[in-house]
Image (cartoon, rainbow, N blue to C red):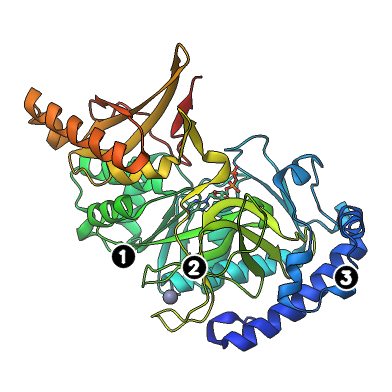
Amino acid sequence: MGTEQHTEKMSRQEITDLQTERLVRQVEYAYDRSPFYREALTSNGIHPQDIRSLSDAAALPFTTKADIQDRFPYGLCVVDPGEIARVHSSSGSTGRPINTCYTKNDLGVWAECMARALSVAGVGSEDVCQIAFRYTLFTGAFGHHLGAETLGANIIPTSSGNTERQILMMQAFGTTVLHCTPSYAIVLAEKMEEMGIDAKKLPLRLGIHGAEPMGDGVRDEIQERLGYRIARDYGLTELGGCGVSCECEAQDGYHINEDHFYPEIIDPSTDRPLPDGEVGEMVFTTLTKEATPVLRYRTRDLTSLTRETCSCGRNAARHGLILGRTDDMLIVGGVNFFPTQVEQVLSSREELSPHYMIRITKQGRRDVATVECEFTPDAWSCRNDHLLQAVGDRLQQDLRTQLGFRMSCEFLEPFTLERSEGKTKRVLDQR
Ligand code: ADP
Ligand code: ZN
């Protein structure tokens, strides 16, 4: 798996050829090694020899999260325990956590994917990378660490938490790149403001944030408050963690490491593949995994794909913003929506902080949805009944337009909602 052979400088045709060759091999490998896939292919009347082109992938059966969860602790791992070099776990934001296993080679490929993701974002060997993802079973910290190390950057592995100390390290060592969840970037921004530190005067120039959704509104606000550009990255434990894709400086979609992951978008209601440009559920087939090959994994993440050349010059396919996940979808009074749509409305109001919590209760047989949001300290200090009324009216109107039903708003004092060092829980469904 030489680093010279990658999608960044390849033409579309070369990418397709490489993906085809690897898909054929990965399907054969999964069939030979995995009783689960042998059974799944056989019961669908498919033999590995039927898979000769990328379009043949559509004939393969899907893999779901339950397929992995049901096989605790090794999931769909096909190598002997003695060949496993590392285990990581999901954060468990939706249901039972799951594990993913790597061989030594898989770790090498992961390092290559993460190095590429970080270099797409703009990281180089001269950077000082502060890894403020939590070093734990979760893939974020170790993945970013591997990538930054591969690029030859200076790494400060602060992990998350102890925010004041993070800021002191940042000042002392001249951190240029901050790696953490969007939630923790907000916590850091708030702490710096509280300590009277102007982030714009620090050498910080880039924030790489992933593992949870962050809309463009919140992205822009954090860019402004921390005085850097943000590149969002994406991945999931089931595919080996972060390192699946990352935004470049154009901020116009996440470049996928297509030489290791074959992407598709499907209509989640019919399971049919959708053309580029249409929004649906993203599905990935791993192309080079040894420990845990995964065929057509249903990520539950909703977005669209483009294979057009990016303005940065790279040909690697891009997916758009993650609009929500199918298992995050809420239904209130018969209307579907995603928490990210609420975030989008809130982030357009400058009086409000980026923190919010959606609470859903039942009053009799009626669903009642409320969003709790916080004023910024500035707006709070000059609040009056008139301002509260005006912001409330406007917000309710915007939420109704965006969501199609009435969501009421509760305004809280600054710093009332719980802060998170990792992923933030945004919904309290008390029905
Ligand atoms: P889980 O959160 O399901 O326990 P993971 O920790 O593996 O498992 O997280 C993977 C999920 O996190 C993805 O499927 C996606 O929903 C979300 N995610 C990761 N990166 C991003 C991102 N940049 N934007 C939005 N969502 C993301
Ligand atoms: Zn680009």
Q: How much space separates mark 3 and mark 1, taking CA atoms?
A: 48 Å
Which of 77/332 is in front?
332
Q: Amino acid at mark 1?
A: Arg
Please state the horizontal and vertical placement of residue 368, each as a whole percent of the image. Answer: 40, 22
Label whose residue precedes the other's in the sequence (2 or 1): 1
Asked whether the viewer can see residue 289, the reply is no
Is the residue 51 above or below the residue 163 in the image? below
- Name above or below for residue 39 compared with residue 114: above
Secondary structure of residue under mark 2? loop
Residue where numbered disc 2 is placed: 277
Specify the quadrant that holds the N terminus: bottom right
The disc placed on residue 48 is 3
Residue under the point 58% across and 81% down: 7
The residue at which mark 1 appears reads as: 205
- x, y percentage for residue 27? 82, 68
Q: In front of the other: label 2 or label 3?
A: 2
Disc 3 packing (10 Å; few <14; some 14–19; many ≥20): some
Left or right: 335 with respect to 325? left
**Residue 163 tag number:** none
Name the residue located 42 percent from the left edge and 71 percent from the top edge. 248
Q: Earlier in the sequence, mark 3 or mark 1?
A: 3
Mark before the other along the chain sequence, 2 or 3: 3
Q: Amino acid at mark 2?
A: Gly
Residue at the top extreme?
A: 364
Q: Are marks 2 and 1 in contact (CB under 8 Å)?
A: no
Which amino acid, by three-letter code, is at mark 3? Pro
Pick whichever, 41 or 4, lies toward us: 41
